[in-house]
Amino acid sequence: MATPKILSIILAGGEGKRLMPLTADRAKPAVPFGGTYRLIDFALSNMVNSNLTKVAVLTQYKSHSLDRHISIAWRMSNMLGNYITPVPAQQRRGPHWFQGSADAIYQSMNLINDEDPDYIVVVGADNIYRMDFMQMVHAHIDSGLDATVAAIRVPRSEASAFGIIDSGADRVIERFLEKPSDPPGLVDSPDESFASMGNYVFTRKALVDMLEFDAHNQESKHDMGGNIIPAFVTKGDCGVYDFTDNEVPGATEKDRNYWRDVGTIDAFFDAHMDLISVVPEFNLYNNDWPILTSQMQLPGAKFTLHGTAESSIVTSGCIISGGDVDHSVLSPGVRVEDHASLDRCIVMSQARIGRNCILRNVILDKHVVVADGVHIGIDREADEARGFHVSPNGVTVVPKNAEVTLAG
């Protein structure tokens, strides 16, 4: 059997309103994560580790930093015909921008026509997980169906928060339910439900025909999960791929089948905390399936004047000068001064924390300067009075380039 031709499309045009203020100046997939990465690096790393090296990234909202990151960090070999390319909205179908995720692909139909693939892989750009997409492609081919949706098992008691897949023992999807009040259980595990991961594989012609039909449906929201997949389900031509069937090299027993949607500040914060336990919920140190990115060229982290860091990720260029860092993630070039105390903090590149500061459950965006003696994350009312966003779970976010002083 000839090797199938596969085009991969990453949907990276989302505005990410629930991640404000981290998305005030950047697209959601460009938000820094885990010290040295951006959110999109996880989807792209899964692509290249799966040997899927013809990848179009559809961008739209405040995409400059995202486009620049892809262009610099993800250069592929032209000699071998491989590419990872950002594709901005181009109004190819008329004077309007992308009207939804399905419309984004429909407006970019030239990519499909030019590549002429047998199958199309479509994934989101902003979830944290490892997955071998080729295993899903082979399962899709074996099924003989036109569409396949990847699904993760979630407790049935929590399933009302997700788009839920109802399927029989043959793994053909019978119903696609959006946040149902009474989620269906699985045939082999009645206390669990299948939640859609937003990752899809399509047979090329079937997807093109469905996108064309959807584009002329004035009642459609032109959304992949909300319109395209339900249409395939109605035809009886959509299968489910169980994420637990996916075998990723180097996965630990604890982080196998890890998947997290980081669409809110609290989920984003919790995903960072998953990285730093002694046995991490998600293991960044898996060299058999590496998460790749472009690293800043900086010297190693330095600890002076009895500065300490425990259960933390401290990246290159950081200087902890007498400060104490606990259960935190520090991006490149961060400076923590004498007697400063950080606990459960995410500190992005080039931030500065002055002497005698106390930070608890705080996210500092890039280039934030915190003056000597400032406390953040201690008093919710005081943080909100400064104009900082405080999440429902009490995580305080200080926006990019802010200067925080004792006077407020």
Image (spheres, helix red, strand yellow):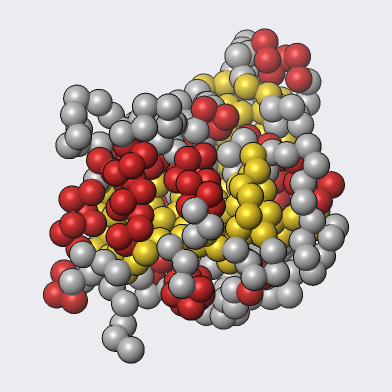
Of residues 187 and 391, the one nearer the viewer is 187
Q: Is residue 136 above or below residue 402?
A: below
- Residue 325 in view (yes/no): no
Residue at (70%, 32%) from the top-left corner? Answer: 395
Q: Is residue 89 visible?
A: yes
Q: Residue at x 63, y 22 (%)?
A: 389
Give x and y (percent) for residue 279.
Answer: 75, 67
Quarter placement of the C terminus: top right
Q: How many marks?
A: 0
Question: Residue 209: horizontal and vertical position, in percent?
Answer: 31, 51
Residue 77, placed above or below residue 120: below
> Could you tell whether 193 is left or right of 112 in the image?
right
- Left or right: 32, with 309 as reference point: left
Residue 137: x %, y % from top left: 45, 71
**In which image quadrant can residue 112 be found?**
bottom left
Figure quadrant of residue 241: bottom right
Residue 373 image point, x, y percent: 68, 25
Q: Front-most of 153 and 50?
A: 153
Position of 97 compared to 121: left or right? left
Looking at this view, name the residue that lies furthest to the front: 235
Q: Is residue 112 above or below residue 353?
A: below
Q: Nearer the viewer, residue 42 or 32?
A: 42
In this rendering, the answer to whether 362 lies above or below 389 is: below
Q: Residue at x 69, y 38 (%)?
A: 179
- Residue located at (55% from left, 63% from top): 239
User: Where the N terminus falls, by quadrant?
Assistant: bottom left
Q: Is residue 211 left or right of residue 160?
A: left
